[in-house]
Image: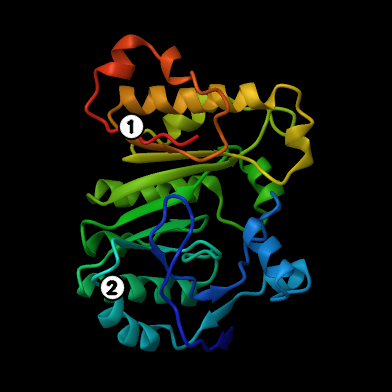
């Protein structure tokens, strides 16, 4: 394992549903081929040259030391910290990364800082023993593991990924799923309802379209497709009393809320989290 050092770690993110974040690893071994936005940015700014460079992760060896200095300065400003936006905190097959992520969350929780985490790896069960305000999620765009292998070649199998999240749920942890970047039917034909049902136990659903992929724009009805899938998420979330978030740019029909059934769109205690 390669270790690097940094001078800073915590920073305010511009990601639409984020606050502060920590990216304590450079690169990601999962090698996602959507393509991966984080990899594109790393190449653009000269941090890596090739895909092979990207899938060889480097750990920030002084991460915990940096936190000890930064937390006292920033804790009054932080609503929550997400692990992570440009890497994976529980990278499949890398126990060193998972253990460091656990220690980072535990250290932030010590100062009552809420953490959220998102992974295509395996979430350790011991996370449930930390601050109950924490939220743990997985990315899942399919339950077809053969297709997963095409786009997320070195990430965890879907069954193991879901099982790890379900174990946390059973222990009382708050859980969520990011169904993003979701592909169009010309890339894979699949039953979206099956995906929602497989994650029916989670507390929150985030949904977003696949970007930076020419196959999406070549699908004639891609805008209508994503409007329909977003509507399915909203209906499912409201019916099952779950939070949801539709990522910016996914919905192109501003009248989609008006098309929801009257009883679901107006009579619910779930706050509307809806972004155009």
Task: Name the N-terminal-most of marks 2 and 1.
Answer: 2
Q: Position of residue 52 (x, y in %)?
A: 75, 70
Q: Which residue is mark 1?
A: 272
Q: Position of residue 154 (x, y in %)?
A: 64, 59
Left or right, residue 249 beside residue 96:
right
Q: Residue at x 36, y 54 (%)?
A: 136
Residue 267's place in the image compared with 63, above or below, is above
Contact check, label 2 and label 1, Cβ < 8 Å: no
Q: Position of residue 222 (x, y in %)?
A: 68, 27
Cα separation between marks 2 and 1: 29 Å
Comparing labels 2 and 1, the label whose residue is closer to the camera: 1
Q: Which residue is mark 2?
A: 108
The answer to which quarter of the image holds residue 106 is bottom left
Q: Secondary structure at mark 1?
A: loop
Residue 164 can be seen, yes or no? no
Q: Residue at x 50, y 40 (%)?
A: 247
Left or right, residue 48 beside residue 77:
right
Left or right, residue 225 beside residue 135:
right
Left or right, residue 107 beside residue 163:
left
Q: Residue at x 21, y 62 (%)?
A: 131
Q: Position of residue 80 (x, y in %)?
A: 31, 61
The answer to which quarter of the image holds residue 217 is top right
Number of marks present in the image shown: 2
Give 130 or 270, whichever is nearer the viewer.
Answer: 270
Q: Residue at x 25, y 82 (%)?
A: 72
Residue 157's place in the image compared with 20, above or below, is above
Q: Which mark is residue 4?
A: none
Q: Quadrant of the N terminus?
A: bottom right
Residue 46 can be seen, yes or no? yes
Query: Colour scheme in the image?
Result: rainbow
């Amino acid at each position: 394992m390669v270790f690097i050092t940094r001078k800073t770690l915590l920073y305010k993110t511009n990601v639409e549903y984020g606050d502060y974040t920590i990216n304590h690893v450079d690169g990601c071994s999962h090698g996602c081929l959507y393509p991966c936005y984080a990899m594109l940015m790393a190449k653009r700014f000269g941090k890596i040259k090739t895909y092979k460079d990207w899938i060889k992760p480097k750990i920030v060896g002084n991460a915990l030391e940096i936190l000890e200095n930064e937390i006292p300065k920033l804790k009054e400003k932080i609503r929550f910290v997400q692990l992570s936006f440009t890497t994976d905190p529980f990278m499949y097959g890398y126990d060193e990364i998972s253990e460091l992520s656990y220690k980072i969350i535990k250290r932030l929780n010590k100062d009552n800082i809420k953490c959220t985490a998102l992974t295509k790896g395996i979430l350790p069960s011991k996370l449930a023993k930390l601050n109950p305000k924490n939220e743990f999620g997985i990315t899942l765009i399919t339950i077809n593991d053969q297709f997963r292998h095409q786009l997320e070649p070195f990430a965890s199998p879907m069954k193991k990924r879901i099982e790890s999240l379900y174990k946390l749920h059973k222990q009382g942890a708050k859980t969520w799923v990011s169904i993003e970047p979701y592909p169009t039917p010309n890339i894979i034909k699949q039953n979206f309802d099956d995906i929602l049902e497989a994650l029916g136990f989670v507390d929150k659903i985030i949904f977003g379209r696949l970007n930076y992929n020419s196959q999406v724009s070549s699908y004639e009805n891609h805008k209508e497709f994503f409007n329909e899938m977003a509507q399915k998420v909203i209906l499912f979330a409201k019916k099952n009393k779950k939070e949801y978030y539709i990522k910016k740019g996914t919905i192109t029909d501003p009248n989609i809320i008006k098309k929801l059934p009257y009883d679901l769109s107006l009579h619910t205690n779930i706050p509307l989290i809806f972004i155009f």
